[in-house]
Amino acid sequence: MAPRGVATPDVRERLFAAAERIVERNGPGALTSRAVTTEAGCAKGLLHTHFAGFDAFVAELCLDRFAKTAVKARALCEIAGRGTVEQNLNAVALALFDSGGLALSTLAMTRPAAVLAIREALEQGAPGFTAIQEAIADYLEAERELGRVAQTVDPPTVALAVVGTAHHLLMTGRPGTPDPRPLVTRLIATLVGVRPS
């Protein structure tokens, strides 16, 4: 634990990573500000020093994870023509389920103030499902131009189907239910698995 008055490096990421470990290990009900700071090895009040309360922390955690997935999605165009289309799409779509994605979604939905903060941030342009969807569509268009995706594939529709399915599974899944990732993998294979003729 950092001594009082000594700066804690990368405090946001440290607290976010601690929250993800707690949720993965014990479920969303175990996540409290005290549990997060204890897990992170930080002073008890550190979370409230950096966030305007626990709901703000939960909202920022969710937004941070959306932003990281959006960065991954935007990088897809750089790897067009390499790997397989299915593998590349899976790396992005399945990232939404990493680090306790289901449990974090459940937690956020039980906290109306966090949901409102997330919605407001997305409306103001924070990267979320729309940014991920647009990046996937751009990637699929690039792969179609390279002849690695059939001309009959409509990139915006496939992107909507992938992101919409991930969103649905995140919002309706619960920790302890079957892993939704195989469904996403099968969906992607079905949507883009038809080889160009």
Image (cartoon, rainbow, N blue to C red):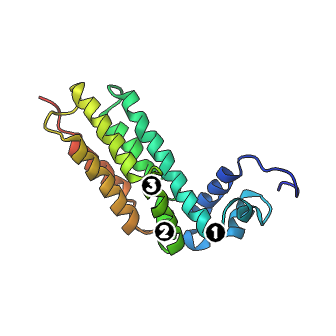
Q: Earlier in the sequence, mark 1 or mark 3?
A: 1
Under circle 3, the secondary element is helix
Residue occupying the point 71% across, 47% down: 10
* Residue 72 position within the rendered picture, expressed as x and y whole percent measured from the top left: 45, 40
175 horizontally vs 50: left or right: left
Q: Report the residue marked by disc 2.
A: 116
- Identify which amino acid the numbered label 1 is placed on: Phe
Under circle 2, the secondary element is helix
Q: Tell us which disc is closer to us: 1 or 3.
A: 1
Quarter of the figure with the N terminus: bottom right
Disc 3: CA contacts within 10 A as few (<14), some (14-19) or many (>=20):
many
Q: Earlier in the sequence, mark 1 or mark 2?
A: 1
Q: Report the residue marked by disc 1.
A: 54
**Separation of disc 1 and disc 3 at Cα?**
22 Å
6 horizontally vs 73: left or right: right
Residue occupying the point 13% across, 38% down: 152
* Residue 130 position within the rendered picture, expressed as x and y whole percent measured from the top left: 36, 51
**Separation of disc 3 and disc 2 at Cα?**
21 Å
* Residue 104 position within the rendered picture, expressed as x and y whole percent measured from the top left: 51, 63
Q: Report the residue marked by disc 3.
A: 97
State the image quarter where residue 148 is shown.
top left
